[in-house]
């Protein structure tokens, strides 16, 4: 089964300095039909104004992946990490027993546009951790490139959850297929552009929930950038 959710159906909060769309229940947005999908708990599409950001705040027992689409995001955390994340970079922060961090637009003038993803870990109480890797556009062009996985395969960042994340860029005749193993869930988020997913055209901000689907076919892209999640079932 494929369930399409259009961009405009997401939760939305505009705070002036922050314009945010929520694919799942978050902060003041509550939707009992969209709390999580398997272990995928949050996809927030954030646009942060120049010089603005989130001051130090805490997380625990969550795998947090940041994927920048435009601009640059400055990160600092209580583990001593500090970096500036740009398009092509993937940051993984395992909150574990607890971590404090801050995130600010690294530019005073230009917008930063990003996806922040939360994934429920396999178990609570792990040690906090941090990892950052870069995946250039060529590695994602016309294919699905694994960027996060439980075993860090193919140079991806390692997340402590039953989930893998793939990123792809598609334009024109470029296409890809993905075999979703039996019993697994798939979730596809279109970050920019448009493309066809199993024959249905999706636009930026749209998503597809995939269950009991053997093969995912991506084609007919128009400057499309997508994230595909391979997810286990969440017990309990």
Image (tube, grey):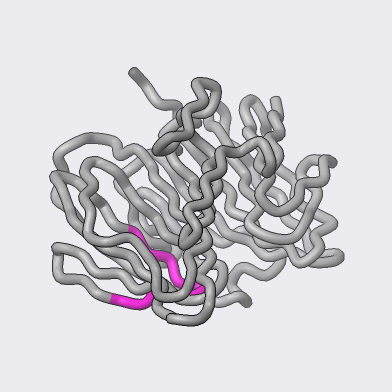
Q: Is residue 226 above or below residue 31?
A: below
Q: Which residues are magenta?
A: 83-92
**Residue 56, how many percent across, how many down?**
22, 60
Can the viewer see residue 135 in this picture? no
**Residue 132, how many percent across, how many down?**
34, 69
Specify the principal SS of the magenta part: strand
> Which corner quadrant holds the N terminus?
top right
Can the viewer see residue 199 in this picture? yes
Q: Judge whether residue 208 is colored magenta.
A: no
Looking at the image, residue 113 sits to the left or right of residue 39; the answer is: right
Q: Residue at x 30, y 69 (%)?
A: 75
Q: Residue at x 80, y 48 (%)?
A: 196
Q: Residue at x 29, y 36 (%)?
A: 122
Looking at the picture, tell me which residue is in the foreground, 51 or 130.
51
Q: Judge whether residue 86 is colored magenta.
A: yes
**Residue 71, how many percent across, how many down?**
51, 76
> Farthest residue in the front direction?
16
Looking at the picture, tell me which residue is in the foreground, 66 or 138.
66
Looking at the image, residue 188 sits to the left or right of residue 229; the answer is: right
Q: Residue at x 29, y 43 (%)?
A: 62
């Amino acid at each position: 089964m494929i369930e399409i959710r259009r961009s405009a159906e997401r939760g939305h909060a505009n705070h002036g300095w922050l314009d945010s769309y929520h694919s799942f229940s978050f902060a003041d947005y509550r939707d009992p039909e969209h709390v999580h999908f398997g272990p995928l708990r949050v996809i927030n599409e954030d646009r942060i104004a120049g010089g603005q950001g989130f001051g130090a705040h805490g997380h625990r027992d969550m795998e947090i992946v940041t994927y920048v689409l435009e601009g640059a995001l400055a990160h600092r955390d209580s583990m001593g990490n500090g970096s500036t994340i740009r398009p092509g970079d993937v940051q993984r922060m395992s909150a574990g027993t607890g971590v404090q961090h801050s995130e600010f637009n690294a530019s005073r003038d230009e917008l930063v546009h990003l996806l922040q993803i939360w994934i429920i870990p396999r178990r609570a109480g792990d040690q906090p951790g941090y990892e950052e890797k870069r995946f250039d556009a060529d590695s994602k062009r016309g294919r699905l490139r694994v960027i996060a996985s439980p075993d860090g395969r193919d140079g991806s960042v390692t997340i402590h959850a039953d989930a893998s994340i793939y990123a792809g860029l598609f334009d024109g005749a470029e296409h890809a297929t993905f075999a979703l193993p039996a019993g697994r869930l798939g979730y596809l988020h279109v970050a920019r552009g448009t493309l066809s997913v199993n024959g249905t055209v999706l636009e930026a901000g749209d998503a597809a929930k995939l269950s009991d689907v053997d093969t995912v076919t991506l084609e007919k892209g128009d400057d499309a950038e997508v994230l595909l999640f391979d997810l286990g079932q969440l017990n309990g």
